[in-house]
Image (spheres, rainbow, N blue to C red):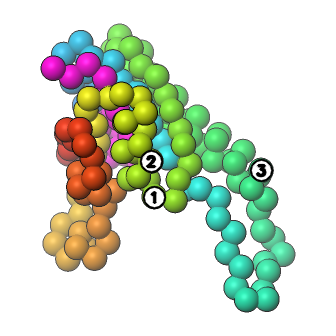
Amino acid sequence: MFRHILIPTDGTALSMQAVQQGVQFAKSIGAHVTFFHSPPAYEMVVYGEYFPADVMTSEEYEQITSEASRKILSAAENEANAAGVACATLQAPSHQAWEAIVAAAAEQKCDLILMASHGRRGLSSLLLGSETSKVLTHSKIPVLVVR
């Protein structure tokens, strides 16, 4: 049924649990996975005439976020390799991670997105929202949420 699973990860403990569960699920059904990380896109905030003196250049920011993405995706890739699951990695900076996740799933022709629930409950989930709920709302393919 599912042959290609997109597993977004941000490197947090909860996200890495989803990676582990996603790898085991993929193994059990014979699917391959694409691990995806979306670091925040570079954004310089200038307030009126105030221009901070210690602004990081876009090149410096890209270098730092690329290295962080490589570490996060490498950890996920190690999980898949240890389980014998075929995998690929992909990273794309974005201002809205949920949009990048939905776009990556479409571009990679995935037939399932498997991601962690961030565990927000009650009022905080209504006020803050979550990337998971936004992906659930906007995805045109099935989304499996793991805890």
Q: Which residue is depicted at the point 34% across and 32% down?
A: 6
On the question of residue 27 being in view, the answer is yes
**Label placed on residue 59:** 3
Position of residue 33 measured from the top left corner of the image (x, y, whole percent): 35, 24
Residue under circle 1?
A: 96
Residue 47, by quadrant, is bottom right
Residue under circle 2?
A: 100
Q: Which residue is depicted at the point 24% across and 12% down?
A: 30
* Tag 2: amino acid: Ala
Position of residue 50 measured from the top left corner of the image (x, y, whole percent): 78, 86
Q: Which residues are magenta?
A: 1-20
User: Relative to 66, is 50 on the left or the right?
Assistant: right
- Closer to us: mark 2 or mark 3? 2
How many discs mark residues in the rendered view?
3
- Closer to us: mark 3 or mark 1? 1
| Quadrant housing the N terminus | top left
Q: Crowdedness of circle 2 by 10 Å Cα count: few (<14), some, many (20+)?
A: many
Q: Crowdedness of circle 3 by 10 Å Cα count: few (<14), some, many (20+)?
A: few
Q: Which residue is depicted at the point 59% across and 56% down?
A: 41
Front one among 28 and 12: 28
Whether 27 is drawn above or below 36: the answer is above
Is residue 18 shown in magenta?
Answer: yes
User: Relative to 62, is 107 on the left or the right?
Assistant: left
Q: Calculate the distance from the C-alpha at mark 1 to the C-alpha at mark 2.
A: 7 Å
Position of residue 4 measured from the top left corner of the image (x, y, whole percent): 31, 23
Q: Calculate the distance from the C-alpha at mark 3 to the C-alpha at mark 1.
A: 20 Å
